[in-house]
Amino acid sequence: MNRKVPFTIRLGILIVAALFMFLAAGQFAGNVLAQDAGASQDCIDCHTDETPKMVEAWEGSAHNPVNAGDGEGALCLDCHAAEADDFDAWEHEGVTVARHPTPKDCAACHDEEVEEFSRSKHAATAMIFMANSFDRKVLEPTLATKHGCQECHNIGHFWPDQSVGECDACHPKHSFDVAVARNPYTCGECHIGPDHPHIEIYLESKHGNIFTTHMSEWDLGYKSEDNDGLTPLPVPTCTTCHMDAAPGIASTHDVGERMSWETQAPYTIRTTEAWGDGLLWQEKRENMETVCRQCHAQPFIERYLLIGDLNALQYNEIYRETKRWLNAMNDAGMIVTPGFEGLAPFTVAGYDEEVEEIAYYVWHHEGRRYRHGALMMGADYTQWHGIWELQHDLIGIIRDAAEKGLPEAEAWVASDDPNKFWLYPFYDVPGTAWGPDILAYRKGDDYTSKIMMNRGDEATLDEYWERAYANVEAVYNAGLLSDKQWELVQEMYENREYESGEMFELPPEFQVHVAGLKLDAAATQEQVIDLELPGAPGWVYEGE
């Protein structure tokens, strides 16, 4: 039965609630920075009229003591307090306030997060890429990059108070919403575009497919350390892999603690201890595998990452070959670069020759997409936006060299050897990340894919695997693959008859589809190739 609560009781409840809120705000102010809660209330009162959405964002945030509870939270002047001689001090309505709260201010409450971020690669982005960006130094007006590259690279902004970073690059101002920071589309503000399309790669992947299907159903504002370190989502977001807690590893703002490759630079290298809290690359990889094991079985993790790693290394050989051709052209006097020395990390460093521009794309665009796609389950970015574009770039450089009369390039263009496109040492392992492939590597007249290894007799096949194995062994000996990975490589090679499908019969459907393809080929011949239309085209060449 419903009963109306008497007015006096309701009034008493309201008074107690108001008193609690007042005491909570006062307790917070005393516990944290001892700021004047009254002065902060003046800010709130004024900005409720002037910038109401700013106040609304704060009111709904965990910084609001009413939401934080236990005497925690942050009032206006806890973040915006300033001394008169601070670089961003501003006399505003009779109060000295800070225009630009920095990570130094955030560290008053979030010291561990600020320390982790400050040592991370994110914190180095402004120093490494903006202060020393060669395309910015040579090709682009600096003004344009202020709202271009710099807008993202300022996540590592260097502040006059000696702090580094821009916390609200991920956590939006005044709400500082963890759910926004955890959403892949927030990462996609910067990790997007022709040179690092990580958001597109993620959305192409099965991970992104599941996320976009169900994202409206999930609360991304969870505490990472809850649930015994398990992610409460059935699919990873960017932060799941790179930042959130997982069984046995703590959450972190140092994104390098799980990154075992440097794949944005001109060459792929195993990450050093310079970033990632001094961890060895093997330790970083184990951290990442720990995250993967929440959803994937260990055999799949090991096979997928091994093939991804070999793709990252394969890029090196393509870029090395690209530079070799440019050096040969430079030595022959076909391209000229005086004045550009020291402005770019290329042996040939100009932007005034088309081949030099192509070489830049080999690394900065296509090469990054190829590597990142291979490691992030982005098939199209590995293939058509990656390795295909890399090959196309390399061929373009060689053709340019041939037109300029470089003998090796002329011989390459004139060659009718289909293997001429394999200009560099290659890696491969039998099978796939998902298990045996009984079709693609199959020998024999009944079916062959005619890829390089299947263009000749059985000796060609054996030679292919010998060459690939020797290259994989070389990078293992160089410390670029782990002992565990090398054991897997040896197992796959020892069982290559199984991995490559030779010991399995093709399913009956194979012949069904062979017949279907023949039927389609006959239809194409009849409906297109043999079909002649009577009407003349609009223009006909009248020459010899």
Image (cartoon, rainbow, N blue to C red):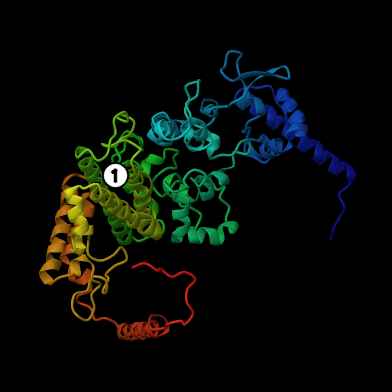
The residue at the point 57 percent across, 45 percent down is 180
| Relative height, residue 228 to residue 349 (above, below) | below
Q: Return the x and y of residue 530 as percentages of the image width and height.
A: 38, 83
Give amino acid for label 1.
Answer: Thr
Farthest residue to the left: give it. Answer: 459
Q: Quadrant of the N terminus?
A: bottom right
Q: As drawn, is 101 to the left or to the right of 435?
A: right
Q: Position of residue 71 (x, y in %)?
A: 63, 32
User: In the rendered image of this protein, does residue 294 appear above or below residue 280?
Assistant: below
- Where residue 343 appears, x then y in whole percent? 34, 30
Callout 1 crowding tier (Cα within 10 Å): few <14, some 14–19, many ≥20? many
Residue displayed at 63% across by 31% down: 74
Query: Regarding mark 1 in the picture, which secondary structure is present there?
Result: loop
Foreground residue, 109 or 161? 161
Observer-nearest residue: 232 or 330?
330
Asked whether residue 213 is in view, the answer is yes
Indicate left or right for 339 with 451 as reference: right
Residue farthest along the right direction in this orientation: 7
Residue holding disc 1: 268
Q: Kindly identify the residue that appears in the image at 53 percent across and 46 percent down.
A: 186
Q: Quadrant of residue 40?
A: top right
Q: Is residue 277 left or right of residue 165?
A: left
Quarter that holds the C terminus:
bottom left
Name which quarter of the figure residue 364 lies in: top left
Judged left or right of residue 161, residue 410 is left
**Rendered view: 516 above or below 402:** below
* Outermost residue, top side: 85
- The x and y percentages for residue 362 are 33, 47
